Image (cartoon, rainbow, N blue to C red):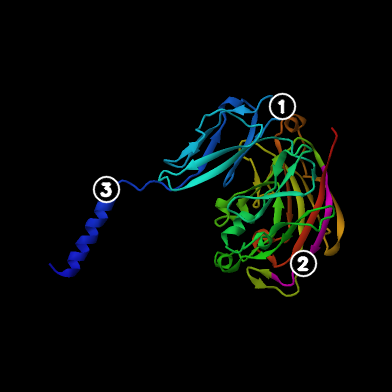
Amino acid sequence: MKPKYIVLCFFTCMSLFSCIQDEAPNAEADITAFSVKDAGDGILDVDIENDKILVWVSPNLESYRFAPEFVLTPGATISPESGTQLDFAEPQYYEVTSEDRKWKKKYEVSFLAADIPTEFSFEHYYIKEKTNYETFYEEDAEGKILMSWASGNPGFAITGMGTDKNAYPTMSSADGYKGNCVKLVTRSTGFFGSAVGMPIAAGNLFLGVFDVSNALTDALKATRMGFPFGYRPVALKGYYKYKSGPVFTENGSSVSGKKDACDIYAVFYETDANLKRVDGTNKFTHPNVVSIARISSQKETDEWTEFNIPFEMVAGKTIDPVKLKNKKYNLGIVFSSSIDGDHFNGAIDSTLLIDEVKLECAVN
């Protein structure tokens, strides 16, 4: 037999042999679904993030003892076991181990009453294990975490440009109107970002969830905005500083004579069986949107400048008081260093500082 036929037969046999072998054990260690059967109607919404699960519950719950159940990637195991009753008055931690036993992931599971605060100071942040970017959160007078802010930092981490916390688009600054503030900077995403058509990353901070799994395939849908809110918002107030970067770019190419601008806005919308979150594709246009507050006179300023943006009702929309009481509306708040940054247009080094934000709400 000629050598080339011997080689062909060898690889054919090896291919057939590999097909009849058992599949290699799964190397994934993820929670793919979450449910709480013993909570009745107390669960309003659930967000599964990369290493965190947020469970939004009715503020009227008398007990936080639940036995949540998990769906995992094939072959994975979880500790504590699915169905174990725990007290979620404080966050609980689970460890998922992959089927091949080589990979582990720790999840933080938090049950949060659907009453987000109406004042935001940006004094507090933490750096997650195995990351070097900051995550902002708000706490009450007793130091209990009420909510965490989301940002595009997890997506920026994929580019490899986040060498330290100050290299990310979203970070803290001591130069606040009072104490600390949030600092948002439009960054270059380097070679990797340019290669996938995402040459810049605007600094952003928002109420909602950043879906890392969509960061590269559908960036607009990765920004999922809003948390349950039981009051009618009237105005969004606070203080900002802004400086545009020197060179505006579209699709990675410079555009002469054009300057960047920041963006500050909030959307209030009704949730239903078909809509749990608005995202970058429908934040202003979805038929469930009830009212919008958006800055229209932003300017460059080296001094702390006050903003006071009223919520404007969408034509033909009303707010149902019963649905409002039952937390069937979500509120999203967004700050960005580049107004068109979600389409990867803007100026590198555009910088927005935000501090002492307050939601003014109707009393009835």
Q: For residue 14, what is the image quadrant?
A: bottom left
Magenta-drawn stretch, dominant element (helix, strand or loop)? strand
* Residue 328 image point, x, y percent: 70, 34
* Residue 217 image point, x, y percent: 54, 56
Chain part drawn in magenta: 234-248
* Residue 277 image point, x, y percent: 65, 43
For label 2, count other residues whose C-alpha is less than 10 Å away and answer few (under 14), some (14-19) or many (20+).
many
Q: Which mark is residue 244?
A: 2
Left or right of 41? Residue 260 is: right
Which residue is under mark 3?
20
Circles 1 and 2: CB distance less than 8 Å?
Answer: no
Tell whether position 236 is magenta.
yes
Which residue is under mark 1?
60
* Residue 264 image point, x, y percent: 77, 54
Q: For residue 194, what is the image quadrant?
A: bottom right
Helix, strand, or loop for circle 3? loop
